[in-house]
Image (tube, helix red, strand yellow):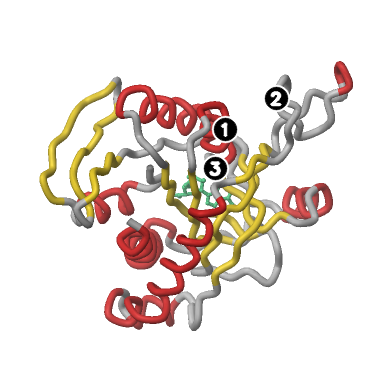
Amino acid sequence: MAAMHEELNRIVAMLSDVSEEKVGHKLVTLGKLNNKKVVVVFSGWGKVAAATTSTMLIERYAISQLLFTGVAGAIQNHLNIGDIVIGTSFVQHDMDCAGVLGIKRFEIPLLSLTEIPSSKALQIKSEQAANDYLSSDLVNDVDKEELENLNITSPVIYSGLIASGDQFISSEEKLQELQQALPKLLAVEMEGAAVAQVAYEYDLPFIVIRIISDKANDDSLIDFPRFIDKVASHFTAGIIKNLV
Ligand code: SAH
């Protein structure tokens, strides 16, 4: 699953034996990548879109593992645009039952869970795939000038906690509130924790790989679509190719 059309297109372009199916409003692409059968689909934005799309992949295509790629806002100050975040656990930052029935902030009602981990095996493989991409493929894959314009000199791979909510975070106030409430939090986005919850309920191994596109604060990226098209989508397609 990819959260950006530019990423999706680049992933689909790597497939062989391609066919397409329409499921609801979604176009699903079936094919082979490195001789493995894959199903590629746009996740939509937000937790509901990500949850329904994940469920569709499990129920209709009986997928054996789920890889999710997209962009995210950095929460810790040392993360920079172009860095890669591999999600090791996921929290829904807008889940709040306000203490009703003793349910704490961020706890998923009835599951009694706050953080949901991704597959350890896929974390290790994703770190390796991202490392291989950065150390060998990147130089021939992304225009040097595009990287220089965004001050991307040597992207770093981080593994850790990702938070998701139905909100694009772009204010210093909300950023600080999240930093305080969740001190280990690396990045924020709108889908990962929803994918995690569905995967948890179906016992499905999954991983989420995010490229930092912004710093979740008042100065948003000047040209978001250009960053996705010229940089982030190359990173994710390259990593996915190595991973699969
Ligand atoms: N503002 C952009 C669109 C946002 S895209 C534009 O003008 O094109 C929304 C996607 O970005 C979602 O998939 C979400 O997961 C991710 N995302 C990136 N940075 C984010 C942030 N700071 N807060 C929340 N989601 C973010």
Q: Position of residue 145 (x, y in %)?
A: 35, 82
Disc with the residue nearer the chain's start (1 vs 2): 2
Does the CB distance between marks 1 and 2 fall below 8 Å?
Answer: yes
Ligand 1: does it lie within 8 Å of the C-beta at label 1?
no
**Residue at (73% x, 32% y) in the render:** 113
Residue 8 seen from this side: yes
Residue at label 3? 192
The amino acid on which the numbered mark 3 sits, given as a three-letter code, is Gly
Q: Position of residue 11 (x, y in %)?
A: 27, 53
The amino acid on which the numbered mark 2 sits, given as a three-letter code, is Leu
**202 or 210: nearer the viewer:** 202
Residue 218 seen from this side: no
User: Alpha-carbon distance for marks 2 and 3?
Assistant: 17 Å
User: Alpha-carbon distance for marks 1 and 2?
Assistant: 10 Å
Specify few, some or many for label 2: CA neighbours under 10 Å numbering under 14, 14-19, or 20 or more: few
Residue at label 1? 200
| Label annotation for residue 37 | none
Ligand 1: does it lie within 8 Å of the C-beta at label 3?
yes
**Residue at (38% x, 38% y) in the render:** 64
The residue lying furthest to the left in this view is 17
Disc with the residue nearer the chain's start (3 vs 1): 3
Depth check, mark 2 against mark 3: the one in front is 2
Residue at label 2? 111
Question: Which quadrant would the C terminus be assigned to in this image?
Answer: bottom left
